[in-house]
Amino acid sequence: MNISKPFCIQILLIVLLFPLQSRADLGGNPASIAADGKAMNATLRSMPSALYMVSILQLPSGTVVKEFADNTTGTVFGIAWQGPFMPDLKQLLGSYYSAYVGALHAKLGPGFVDTPGLVVRSNGHMRAFSGQGYIPNLLPSGVSPSQIQ
């Protein structure tokens, strides 16, 4: 089978551009939160505060995911979840997912990662999961990691 070079270039462009248009994650913008809701078939509502906006995604599984976006920059700096099922962390962590998995493999513990570029705490048991993740250098001034819950 002989595939033309222009066809290969088109496929490569689609593969490279598609994730940028459809994925929301830590470090993403507020418009990307709607993409998360759609990808996870969730209902979405928002709660503003002085320093950040909390977008609350209610998943069909009963799990609630919160995404925290800086009011000044619009950047998603944190996520939190709680419910009977784990959310899709690959979807929520996006480009940080490989760093999360790599850090988990490098240590001997449950789902806790604490690096200078990423903090994720995931725990729970059957039908009761919770966790949080954030990018330390993206936390808005005056926001504590304990507020991401």
Image (cartoon, rainbow, N blue to C red):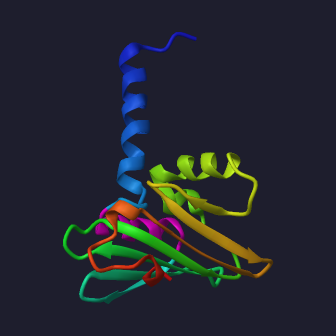
Quick check: can you spot residue 86?
no
Residue appearing at x 29%, y 65% in the figure: 75
What type of secondary structure mainly makes up the magenta span?
A: helix
Q: Quadrant of the N terminus?
A: top right
Residue appearing at x 24%, y 88% in the figure: 50
The residue furthest left is 72
- Choose between 59 and 129: the one closer to the eye: 129
Residue appearing at x 50%, y 65% in the figure: 39
Where on the picture, by quarter, is residue 130?
Answer: bottom right
**Left or right of residue 137, residue 89 in this image:** right
The residue furthest top is 2
Residue appearing at x 60%, y 75% in the figure: 131
Up-down relation of residue 64 to residue 28 (above or below): below
Check if residue 108 falls in the magenta segment: no
Check if residue 31 falls in the magenta segment: yes
Up-down relation of residue 146 to residue 27 (above or below): below
**Left or right of residue 93, residue 73 in this image:** left
Quick check: can you spot residue 35?
yes
Up-down relation of residue 68 to residue 94 (above or below): below
Magenta span of residues: 29-41
- Percent x, y of residue 91: 52, 59
Where on the picture, by quarter, is residue 135?
Answer: bottom left
- Choose between 23 and 116: the one closer to the eye: 116
Give the total of numbered labels.
Answer: 0
Where on the picture, by quarter, is residue 141?
Answer: bottom left
- Percent x, y of residue 56: 44, 83
- Percent x, y of residue 30: 30, 69
- Percent x, y of residue 20: 36, 49
